[in-house]
Image: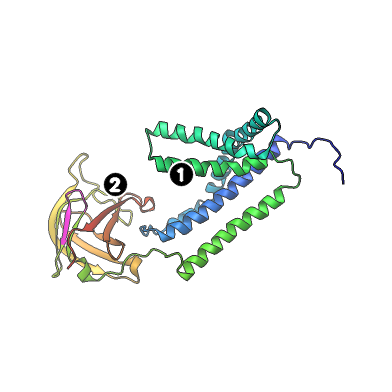
């Protein structure tokens, strides 16, 4: 069948914008799934309540995501699609899809370069990865932006949702079969706690087998918040030395699993109480939260001897 010869109409700017936003949102969902699966395999604290808080703020996250998708579409995707058409006409004599990836790479290079310049520099490898991921992120919506194909929203939605679901399923299967190893804190016993632990900044905690503990220059100011959200020392004068030293007692509580292990420390001059178990079997750590537990900012002690 012969074509009519009439040039295909460009999609209206508003529809192209919506299509770009849709693709970026789907890409964001895919990135979240990958990040969650990857995060499960990486060493991390048990910041209980984080998932519940994320669900609680999901509507706000969704609105924010839509706003970001719109801004990225206007600021990055549209310029990449337009630059691709210009390059095609100037260098190739006609518009062609293969000019879009180089155009997207150029646009993302400007963005990443600006971020690096403003931040005062970055690791070259990290900058290269950021540039590649940014290029990949805006290339797909930029290609679809210039597409003249009709009825494209439905296949984009179906394909994007399928990619997200498939990635989640593969991640779940990988974790379930052990191909991807889920991180869990090492299972310790009281004997594993005995010894000298350091914060790497001159502070040490020494546990003895008879239940006594000696703290030397341990930071007692955890951003004003303990593990349960209570103030560690609300009466400490501003600017006062937050390091504490003293002797006291300790006990190990195995809890109901590796995530609930606790080392209860009582040293009168110090405000800290519970330490949680982290790290790995070959490199166990004890930690407390600094500030809000959801921030995962930790004060960490590591062993400085070979164990008991």
Residue at screen point 12% across, 56% down: 246
Q: Earlier in the sequence, mark 1 or mark 2?
A: 1
Quadrant, the C terminus? bottom left
| Mark 1 neighbour class, 10 Å CA radius: few under 14, some 14 to 19, many 20 or more | few
- Residue 125, x across and y down, in percent: 41, 43
Q: Position of residue 55 (x, y in %)?
A: 50, 55
Circle on res. 129: 1
Mark 2, residue position: 223
Report the magenta residues as a range: 199-206
Residue 235 in picture, x, y percent from top left: 22, 46
| Other residues around mark 2 within 10 Å, as few (<14) / some (14–19) / many (≥20) | some
Residue placed most toward the observer, 180 or 55: 180
Asked whether residue 18 is in view, the answer is no
Which of label 1 and label 2 is nearer to you? 1
- Residue 94 visible in image: yes
* Direction from residue 176 to residue 220 in the image, left or right: left
Residue at 31% in and 56% down: 227
Query: Residue 256 vs residue 198: left or right?
Result: right
Determine the residue located farthest toward the front in the rendered image.
92
The number of callouts visible is 2
Residue visible at 27% across and 64% down?
282
Give the secondary structure at mark 2. Answer: loop
Q: Is residue 109 left or right of residue 224?
A: right
Closer-to-camera residue (262/258): 258
Residue 262 lies left or right of residue 205; in this view the side is: right
Where residue 189 sits in the image (x, y, percent)?
Answer: 25, 71
Mainly helix, strand or loop, the magenta region? loop
Residue at x-position 55% and y-position 59%: 167
């Amino acid at each position: 069948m012969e074509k009519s010869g009439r040039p295909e109409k460009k999609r209206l700017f508003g529809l192209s914008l919506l299509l770009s936003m849709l693709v970026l949102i789907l890409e964001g969902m895919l990135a979240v799934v990958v990040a969650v699966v990857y995060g499960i395999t990486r060493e991390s604290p048990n910041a209980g309540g984080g998932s519940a808080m994320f669900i609680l703020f999901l509507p706000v996250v969704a609105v924010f995501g839509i706003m970001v998708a719109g801004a990225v579409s206007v600021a990055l995707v549209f310029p990449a699609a337009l630059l691709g058409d210009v390059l095609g006409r100037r260098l190739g004599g006609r518009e062609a899809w293969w000019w879009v990836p180089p155009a997207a790479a150029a646009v993302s290079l400007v963005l990443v370069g600006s971020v690096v310049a403003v931040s005062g520099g970055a690791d070259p490898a990290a900058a290269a990865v950021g540039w590649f991921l940014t290029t990949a992120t805006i290339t797909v919506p930029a290609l679809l932006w210039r597409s003249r194909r009709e009825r494209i929203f439905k296949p984009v939605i179906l394909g994007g949702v399928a990619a997200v679901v498939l990635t989640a399923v593969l991640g779940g299967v990988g974790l379930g079969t052990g191909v991807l190893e889920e991180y869990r804190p090492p299972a310790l016993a009281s004997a594993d706690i005995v010894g000298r632990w350091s914060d790497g900044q001159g502070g040490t905690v020494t546990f003895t087998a008879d239940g006594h503990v000696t703290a030397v220059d341990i930071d007692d100011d955890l951003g004003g918040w303990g593990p349960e959200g209570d103030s560690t020392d609300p009466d400490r004068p501003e600017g006062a030395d937050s390091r504490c030293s003293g002797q006291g007692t300790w006990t190990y509580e195995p809890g109901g699993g590796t995530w609930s292990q606790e080392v209860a420390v009582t040293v009168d001059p110090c405000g800290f109480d519970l330490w949680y178990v982290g790290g790995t079997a070959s490199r166990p750590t004890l930690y407390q939260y600094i500030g809000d537990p959801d921030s995962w900012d930790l004060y960490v002690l590591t062993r400085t001897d070979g164990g008991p």
